[in-house]
Amino acid sequence: MERVLVLNASYEPLNVCTLRRAHVLVWKGKAEILESHDAPLRSASTAFARPHVIRLVSYVRVPRGVSRRISRRVLFARDGWQCAYCGTGSNRLTLDHIVPRSRGGKSVWENVVASCAPCNHRKGDRLLEETSMTLRTTPRPPTPVLFIRLTAEHIPDVWRTYLPGLDLAAAAA
């Protein structure tokens, strides 16, 4: 299935959609094609440009306070598939609340990190101050580019111009 990169009117990456959805947005005048494939879309009597990157004509306000639901896959990708405490790239990663839920910690992006099973077990339901453990980085909500990278199996070279901060090594993995 072909995928198309969708940009906001401000050229901010929003999402990835199917070729069919992108064509409908362009045909209805809600988006314009910025990059297209060489091979057109054909009907019985007409040929249309095959979109590769589209930009919405009207700006879509993306609420920043409401972030997407936490999933293990996105969390592990945000943390580089490594433990936030020791940095090992374990295949036994778990989700850890920095401030444990038993101590009033919330399930928000700023309070959850990827943790290997031994570090998660060692920390238990204690606060970081009560352990000798430290975080390697400060957890933040993931960027839209991360969701795009996880949605698309392959990031085409044409998209890279529109995806600031794309980690080329992680995109190839």
Image: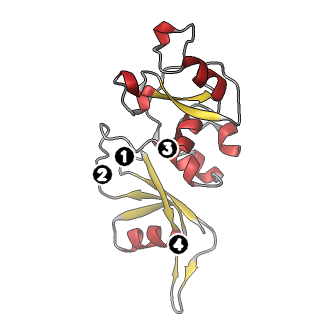
Secondary structure under tag 3 reads loop
Q: Earlier in the sequence, mark 4 or mark 2?
A: 4
Q: Quadrant of residue 69?
A: top left
Tell me the residue that label 3 is attached to.
71
Tell me the residue that label 4 is attached to.
49
Q: Is residue 163 visible?
A: no
Identity of the residue drawn at 68% across and 35% down: 92
Give amino acid for label 2: Tyr
Q: Earlier in the sequence, mark 2 or mark 1?
A: 1
Q: Earlier in the sequence, mark 1 or mark 3?
A: 1
Q: Earlier in the sequence, mark 3 or mark 4?
A: 4
Asked if the residue under mark 3 is in contact with the one under mark 1, i.e. CB atoms within 8 Å, the reply is no
Relative to 110, residue 75 above or below: below
Identity of the residue drawn at 34% across and 24% down: 104
Asked if the residue under mark 4 is in contact with the one under mark 3, i.e. CB atoms within 8 Å, the reply is no
116 displayed left or right of 137: right
* Of the pair 173 and 27, the residue shown nearer to us: 173
x and y percentages locating residue 137 in the rendered image: 54, 19
Label 2 Cα crowd, 10 Å radius (few <14 / some 14-19 / many 20+): few
Identity of the residue drawn at 52% across and 69% down: 19
